[in-house]
Image (cartoon, rainbow, N blue to C red):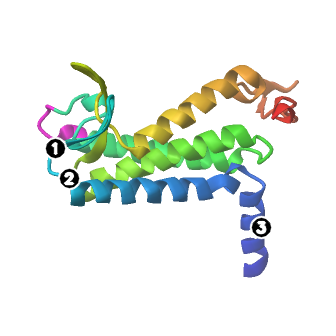
């Protein structure tokens, strides 16, 4: 009986959006390894120029994206940790219920999940997020970021693209009895 339940769970996972969960694991590891490398090889605030518009620099962020709320007295770390846990749980459930044939959306959600987990791990382990990538032009600079932020951005862009190319996955169809149901066939994915 235990074997049939295990087979059933793995069968559901392989037929759902969690089929691409390996991407979450790979990008989580890549994010953590790159952050650890930055911490071990850079001094806080040091900038190593790689291109005329691109540096490596070690910075820490206790706030949200772009250091929003970073100047607060500490409540924001707990707040953003809680939000990350809730969003992560929601994304895992969404992936579990999303059919595997919606591979583009599944990949985008797994990328977002990888980034959320990468930054969540930092907040839990050290109370701040490690950033080390800096783009700039003359005196203007984009806020420092990391691999986790990059895959969140990429996943969100892919999700936005999916909502335009395949709007039936963004909206649920209503059945005749008024209940919400997922789309049955996705023609747009055949274009890729």
Tell me the quarter of the picture where residue 9 sits.
bottom right
Where does label 2 land, which residue?
Answer: 42
Where does label 1 land, which residue?
Answer: 46
Q: How many marks?
A: 3
Instruction: Answer few, some or many: residues within 10 Å of disc 1's Cα (few below 14, many 20 plus, some between 14 and 19).
Output: some
Residue 97 x/y as whole percent: 70, 46
Residue 166 x/y as whole percent: 76, 25
Where does label 3 land, which residue?
Answer: 8
Instruction: Answer few, some or many: residues within 10 Å of disc 3's Cα (few below 14, many 20 plus, some between 14 and 19).
Output: few
Please state, as top left, top right, bottom left or bottom right, where the C terminus lies in the image. Answer: top right
Residue 90 visible at all:
no
Tell me the quarter of the picture where residue 58 sits.
top left
Give SS at disc 2.
loop
Contact between labelled residues 1 and 2, with CB atoms less than 8 Å apart: yes
Identity of the residue drawn at 16% across and 44% down: 46
Contact between labelled residues 2 and 3, with CB atoms less than 8 Å apart: no
Residue 53 x/y as whole percent: 33, 28
Tell me the quarter of the picture where residue 61 sits.
top left
Please state, as top left, top right, bottom left or bottom right, where the N terminus lies in the image. Answer: bottom right
Give SS at disc 1.
loop
């Amino acid at each position: 009986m235990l074997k049939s339940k295990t087979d059933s769970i793995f069968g559901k996972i392989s037929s759902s959006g969690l089929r691409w969960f390996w991407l979450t694991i790979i990008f989580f590891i890549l994010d953590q390894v790159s952050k650890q490398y930055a911490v071990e090889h850079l001094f806080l605030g040091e900038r190593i120029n790689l291109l005329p518009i691109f540096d490596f620099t070690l910075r820490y962020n206790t706030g949200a994206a772009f250091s929003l709320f970073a100047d607060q007295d500490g409540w924001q770390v707990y707040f953003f940790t809680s939000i990350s846990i809730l969003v992560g749980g929601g994304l895992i459930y969404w992936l579990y219920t999303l059919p595997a044939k919606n591979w583009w959306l599944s990949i985008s959600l797994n990328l977002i999940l990888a980034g959320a987990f990468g930054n969540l791990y930092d907040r839990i382990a050290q109370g701040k997020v490690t950033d080390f990538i800096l783009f700039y032009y003359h005196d203007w600079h984009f806020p420092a970021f990391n691999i986790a932020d990059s895959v969140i951005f990429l996943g969100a862009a892919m999700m936005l693209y999916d909502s335009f190319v395949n709007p039936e996955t963004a909206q649920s169809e209503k059945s005749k009895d008024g209940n919400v149901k997922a789309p049955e066939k996705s023609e747009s994915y055949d274009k890729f």
